[in-house]
Image (cartoon, rainbow, N blue to C red):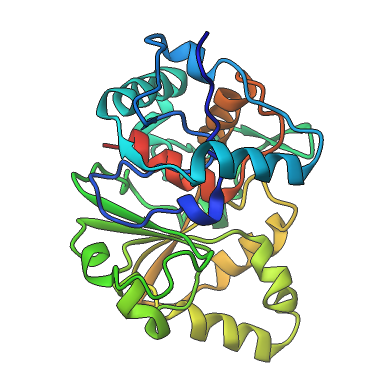
């Protein structure tokens, strides 16, 4: 009987080392634990996601089965997982991470899902002209994905992280105060639109906007924001129209790409909407 393994220990399993973008996180069945992986068919490993009656039960299982054991990369499992994810995404796996004027014609409506409802919209012309003229999201040989959970605090991983060709960060965590542990290079930063509400009070006052722009100045490269789908979509698009920083470029996530990744996990029993962090990691895993 195949021993199923669930990697969902977010705090302990957040990795930020630039190991050719093979970042393992959450529910990815791509590790070999004590040599006990017996299945050769990938569908066996991801065919079903375990569901626990209580959060405490899940934590106990994760600790006893996964976190208390020594882990090693299994390159073969990683390659199998990547190929299956690429197959699921199809044409969307590379050219549809960032909305641009090529993949989002202004006269063609596109669809997205929000709160289990589908919407069809045509992007306004004043928004369309702000999109990049061409695909700006390419492949990278070596990258680091850095979360903001604090799991690498005091790790001194900063120099290793900065050796990557591309550093992908999540949710605009502070940079300067944690350079020794998390590095300073910023090429692409994922920014959940809900942060505009929770951290900056919906930018309702001038001082909120001032603080937002001050914080974002730390980041270089692309500020990747999935305005579609988001309950903060209106505020998100408003920021795009007013955005005038030169330190980085505000770009929109392509909603169909997110939906494809979501469908990949739904077909394996994970019905809840995946987090921005998990989506970011899956992006990098398939982009090599």
User: Is residue 76 at all visible to an observer of this figure?
Assistant: yes
Say which residue appears at 76% left-offset and 44% top-offset: 55
- Residue 85 locus on image (x, y percent): 42, 24
Say which residue appears at 44% left-offset and 39% top-offset: 282
**Up/down of 132 relative to 247, above or below:** above
- For the residue pair 25 and 61, the one nearer the viewer reads as 61
Say which residue appears at 74% left-offset and 40% top-offset: 57
Q: Name the residue at the bottom extreme.
A: 207
Q: Which quadrant holds the C terminus?
A: top left
In the rendered structure, the answer to whether residue 219 lies left or right of residue 7 reads left
- Residue 185 locus on image (x, y percent): 28, 70
In the rendered structure, the answer to whether residue 232 lies left or right of residue 82 reads right
- For the residue pair 15 and 135, the one nearer the viewer reads as 15
**Up/down of 92 relative to 227, above or below:** above
- Total labels drawn: 0
User: Is residue 97 at all visible to an observer of this figure?
Assistant: no
Quarter holding residue 58: top right
Quarter holding residue 191: bottom right
- Residue 33 locus on image (x, y percent): 39, 32
In the rendered structure, the answer to whether residue 160 lies left or right of residue 71 reads left
- For the residue pair 188 and 248, the one nearer the viewer reads as 188
- Residue 179 locus on image (x, y percent): 33, 79
Say which residue appears at 38% left-offset and 84% top-offset: 176
């Amino acid at each position: 009987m195949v021993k199923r393994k669930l990697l969902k220990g977010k705090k302990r399993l957040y990795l930020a080392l630039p190991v050719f973008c093979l970042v393992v996180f959450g529910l990815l069945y791509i590790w070999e634990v004590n040599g006990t992986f017996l299945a050769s068919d990938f569908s066996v490993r991801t065919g079903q996601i375990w569901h626990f009656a209580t959060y405490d039960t899940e934590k106990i299982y994760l600790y006893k089965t996964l976190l208390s054991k020594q882990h090693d990369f299994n390159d073969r499992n990683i390659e199998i997982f990547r190929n299956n994810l690429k197959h699921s995404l199809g044409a969307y796996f590379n050219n549809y991470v960032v909305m641009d004027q090529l993949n989002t014609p202004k006269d063609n409506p596109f669809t997205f899902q929000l709160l289990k409802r589908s919407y069809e919209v045509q992007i306004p012309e004043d928004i369309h002209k702000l999109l990049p003229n061409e695909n700006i999201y390419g492949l990278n040989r070596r990258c680091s994905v850095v979360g903001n959970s604090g799991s690498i605090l005091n790790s001194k991983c900063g120099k290793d992280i900065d050796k990557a060709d591309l550093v992908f960060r999540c949710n605009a965590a502070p940079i300067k105060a944690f350079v020794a542990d998390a590095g300073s290079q910023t090429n692409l930063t994922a920014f959940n639109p809900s942060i505009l509400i929770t951290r900056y009070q919906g930018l309702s006052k001038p001082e909120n906007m001032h603080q937002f722009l001050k914080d974002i100045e730390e980041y270089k490269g692309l500020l990747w924001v999935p305005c579609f789908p988001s309950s903060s979509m209106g505020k998100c698009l408003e920021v795009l129209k007013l955005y005038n920083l030169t330190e980085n470029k505000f770009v929109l996530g392509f909603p169909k790409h997110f939906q494809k990744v979501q469908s990949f996990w739904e077909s394996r029993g994970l019905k809840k909407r995946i987090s921005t962090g998990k989506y970011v990691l899956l992006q990098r895993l398939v982009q090599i």
